[in-house]
Image (cartoon, rainbow, N blue to C red):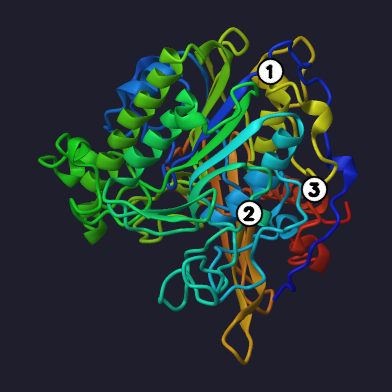
Amino acid sequence: MVKFRNIVPFSGLILVACSPGATAERPNVIYVFPDQLRNSSLGFWSDPEYASQVGWRGDPVLTPNLDRFASESVVLSEAVSNCPVSSPHRGMLLTGMWPERSGVVLNCMSERPESSLREDAECIGDVFAAAGYDCAYIGKLHVDHPTPNNPQRPGTYVSDDLPEWDAYTPPERRHGFNYWYSYGTYDVHKHPHYWDTAGNRHDVDEWSVQHEIGKAIDYIRNADGVRDADKPFFMMIGLNPPHSPYASTDDCDLEGYAHYKDKSASELLVRANADTTMAKTAAAPFYFANVSGIDREFGRLLDALDRAGLARNTIVVFASDHGETLCSHGIVDPKNSVWRESMNIPFIVRYPGRIPHRVDDLLLSSPDIMPTLLGLAGLAERIPRSVEGRDLSSVLMQSPVQAERPQAALYMRNLDGERDAEGLVRGFFAEARGVKTLEHTLELAVDRAGRLTRVRLFDDRTDPYQMNNLDPARHSELFARLSGELARLLRESNDAWYRERTLSDIVPYDN
């Protein structure tokens, strides 16, 4: 078990050179990220232009607005959620730091008091606010440890559920976001609730995505003067769907559902590794319904930007927390695994006149997102020294001088540590670590005594659905090379495996 630690990051990991300089008119930035949307669940991957860039088949999902958006953007085919669970990814997204330094190593809930976004972290909202931006956060946050700080009933949790997953974020923990309409985590898609800037609670009878995009449009229009119109704005929109539940029409967008309700599991689950005998296949039409609903609402957001005359000077990013296995490999767990369906996330960036349209296999990692957004906005000089990710804005913009492209991405899987006498989780168990390159995937897993329990090794080019687990003994040179790459990434990130020399007989930490 690893004790939870806040470790000062290595300043040598910060790469901010080659970023674009500030422009006379600073761009607005909108970051939209549904939860649990896998990269293949976007319609344009079935288009020959995009399909020719990947070795897998896109899901048969209708996303006309995102298809149009992709045609105006750079589309990343290999973006990675390094720790593919909501809270750890969001911690990395907000801070640019790996989970141990962001403070968020496990999904946040009341029984995990040590997993919570650090109050002293300099987050992306802090940086944009200090640079003179009006900052808005709308939707799901899920980076705070729930405490009895209910503004409506002081001294209680925000519900009577135990353990509590949802959380109220007070003003002192909002990290630069002056406009607030958010919640921790609450999976009732058609009856969501939110706390506004003043701490008032709003219970809503509307599909959450539609409601949140409506709030975002009001923010863009500056309805009722909700933002400072003399400032550029930075807005994050954390959508919960297509995150579970997805078991009935009570959970999904009905307009989207009409496209899929009469299709069989084999018609919807077209990946070669999908097990269509699983009970979970019944979720497919509801999952895809929510994806199509998100597409429709995203189109509304883009239309609002056009009507406001802001599209030309607004960077828009569409991404996700992590993926969804959706019956691939016959597993029920939708996330927290090395499978491509779990790790590979959408990452699409539109910056009119500055980013040329293309499909790019850039291995963008979760901690890279914060510094890259700051670099795109011309704020590279403001990237905090605490950031461990890389500013890859020059690569996205195809600048004459570009940052070095990552050759590999780290994978991590953390589980609960031991429980104390009160039943609270202390520390975490670093069960698996791995590495993803453009050609291969490697995962090593251990038991709580540190003994090797699992090796997964895939050639992702010849086996894009990861159905043939290669024998390390028969592919010893490849295994050694990837183990060396893993050692480098663990060393650079000062990961728990590196500090404890986990599997040191396999992973050459000191080479």
* Residue 211 % position (x, y): 34, 41
Q: Which mark is residue 488?
A: 3
**Viewed as shown, does residue 331 lie left or right of 102?**
left
Q: Is residue 406 above or below residue 250?
A: above
Q: Amino acid at mark 3?
A: Arg
Front of the two marks 3 and 2: 2
The answer to whether any part of residue 326 appears in the image is yes
Disc 3 and disc 1: Cα gap in Å? Answer: 37 Å
Q: Are marks 2 and 1 in contact (CB under 8 Å)?
A: no
Q: Amino acid at mark 2?
A: Pro
The answer to whether any part of residue 407 appears in the image is no
Q: Which mark is residue 26?
A: 1
> For the point 69% across and 40% down, which residue is it?
124
Front of the two marks 3 and 1: 1
* Residue 431 % position (x, y): 62, 67
Q: Amino acid at mark 1?
A: Arg
> For the point 59% across and 82% down, which residue is it?
424
Sequence-first tag of 2 and 1: 1
Q: Which mark is residue 171?
A: 2
* Residue 251 % position (x, y): 25, 52
Sequence-first tag of 3 and 2: 2
Sequence-first tag of 3 and 1: 1
Front of the two marks 2 and 1: 2
